[in-house]
Image (cartoon, rainbow, N blue to C red):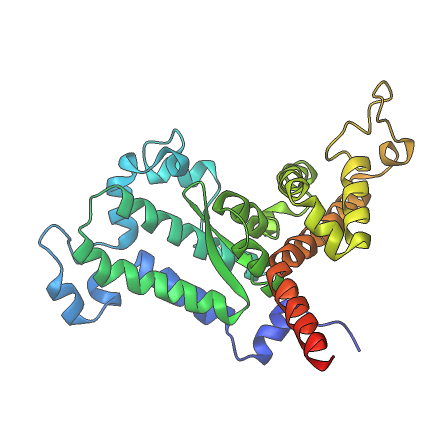
Amino acid sequence: MPRKTFEDILVGLKFSLEAEFNTLWKMFYYPIDREFPQQVWFSLSSSIHCDKSMMELCNGGFSLYPVEIRKTYRNLQDYNRALNIDFSRVDTKNRFDQYLLLCEYVATMLYGLCKSKLITDHDAELIISPTFGQIKNSLQCCGYKLIQRNSVCCAVPINSGVIEAAKAVAPSLANDIMYYGHRDMAGNVNGKRDILVHLCHYLEGVRQDVERISSSIANALFNMANQLEVRHNNIAEQSPKYKPFVAALSKDQLEHWYDNLFKLCIAAILAVDAKPALDEYKEKQESMNKSKT
């Protein structure tokens, strides 16, 4: 039996990529008075022209967007051209990736519009909030969620273990944990290494707790961090930490080991987070044993 593609699975869940893509595309690119109920655009302030699309609103305020979004571009057309963004052409080979990109693009543009202060909170509640709601619900149906990274919205896979680990650490590290699974990170060995450096630095601070709960996870985790070009220079021959077997690894092989190390980091964070529950159980068990005697 041939292995199913993710798109096949979505079809089984009665999730239509084409329908979801078209719905969001129209909400962003079609005139507001065409895509939103009459009571909505009748309630908008006079500064919002209902015969314009949200894309046109974004273009009008693009120069006031946070620099993390607009970079050095002065208008949306130049930005789209530079990043080769054109959703009018359907990519039949990578439909799911194109759908995720549309979600990220629309969400980022609308977030920037809110930050530009060119739209009131009242108007944002009427037209931007429903659009964000559409994106959120649509992504959730296919196992994804939106996160923000440097003011840019990113769609990342929902992984309950990863999410719980992200909840247990500081926001900056939580963002790294969630972003590790983003599709742009596939093949990005340097980016993954940077995230692992942050994770291992955090875990070094709670190393005793990790070792107390699971010495096997702790030993594997910190040995891998020390030998896989994460915490030390293991590739340069002149380095005192040089490891020939690591220097001989291909990019794909090194990425495979980084992904394994990431899983260990998540397991260690979850273990430390569970320590209070383990301690409570241990105290309860000791109390019960004493009562029996």
Q: What residue is shown at x 20% (from left), y 44% (from top)?
A: 118
On the image, the x and y values in percent for residue 284 come to 64, 72
Which of these two is toward me, 162 or 235? 162
Image point 8% across, 54% down: which residue? 46
50 and 280: which one is in front?
A: 280
Q: Where is residue 73 in the image (x, y as percent from the top left)?
A: 37, 31
In the image, farthest residue toward the top: 238
Q: In this view, does 60 lie above or below 147?
A: above
* 13 is higher (above) or lower (below) than 268: below
Horizontal side of residue 98 vs 107, given as left or right:
right
Q: Which of 119 and 12 lies nearest the eye of the viewer?
A: 119
Q: In this view, does 118 lie to the left or right of 71?
A: left
Q: Give the side of residue 265 with respect to residue 30, left or right.
A: right
In terms of image quadrants, where is residue 78? top left
> Which residue sits at x=17%, y=51%?
120
Instruction: Identify the residue at horizontal 32%, vertical 36% (top origin).
Output: 75
* Residue 12 quadrant: bottom right
